[in-house]
Image (tube, grey):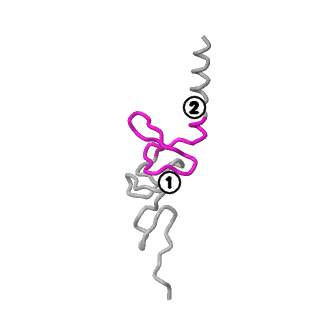
């Protein structure tokens, strides 16, 4: 006799596997779909739908929304802005 515990498919959780796991969201077909890799928790498929950013990502304001961008991408953006500013100052 079993313990009465369901073994859920990937993306599902709960006693009856009827809820989406933290890194999944309910899509239009009422299925649990994986969040973007930038999201630890989300309510949609893109990096602009994150509730919590994944490790290695940080929140960035973009067009009045918060998106999760790779910390490495943010460093590249900072370096690009610094280089452009320095080049502009040298003119």
Q: Nearer the viewer, residue 49 or 87?
A: 87
Q: Nearer the viewer, residue 2 or 35?
A: 35
Q: Secondary structure at mark 1?
A: strand
Disc nearest the viewer among 1 and 2: 2
Res 65 → quadrant: top left
Spot occupied by residue 24 in the image (x, y as percentages of width and height): 46, 56
Q: Relative to 52, say whether 59 is above or below.
A: above
Spot occupied by residue 4 in the image (x, y as percentages of width and height): 45, 82
Q: Nearer the viewer, residue 77 or 8?
A: 77
Q: Residue shown at 49%/61% (left/top)? A: 11
Q: Residue shown at 38%/57% (left/top)? A: 30
Q: Nearer the viewer, residue 86 or 2?
A: 86
Q: Relative to 31, say whether 15 is above or below.
A: below
Q: Relative to 5, say whether 89 is above or below.
A: above
Spot occupied by residue 91 in the image (x, y as percentages of width and height): 60, 10
Tell me, for residue 82, which label it has, or none.
Answer: none
Q: Secondary structure at mark 2?
A: helix
Q: Residue shown at 40%/51% (left/top)? A: 43
Spot occupied by residue 31 in the image (x, y as percentages of width and height): 42, 58
Residue corresponding to mark 1: 40
Residue corresponding to mark 2: 78
In the image, residue 55 lies in the stretch drawn in magenta: yes
Q: Residue extending furthest top?
A: 91
What range of the chain is rendered magenta? Answer: 46-75
Question: Which one is earlier in the sequence, the residue at label 1 or at label 2?
Answer: 1
- What count of labels does the image hold? 2
């Amino acid at each position: 006799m079993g313990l009465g515990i369901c073994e859920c498919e990937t993306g599902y959780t709960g006693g009856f596997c009827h809820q989406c796991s933290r890194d999944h969201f309910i899509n239009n077909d009422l299925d649990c779909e994986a969040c973007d890799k930038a999201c630890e928790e989300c309510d949609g498929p893109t990096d602009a739908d994150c509730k919590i950013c994944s490790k290695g990502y940080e929140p960035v304001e973009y067009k009045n929304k918060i998106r999760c961008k790779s910390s490495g991408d943010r460093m590249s953006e900072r370096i690009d802005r610094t280089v452009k500013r320095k080049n502009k100052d040298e003119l």
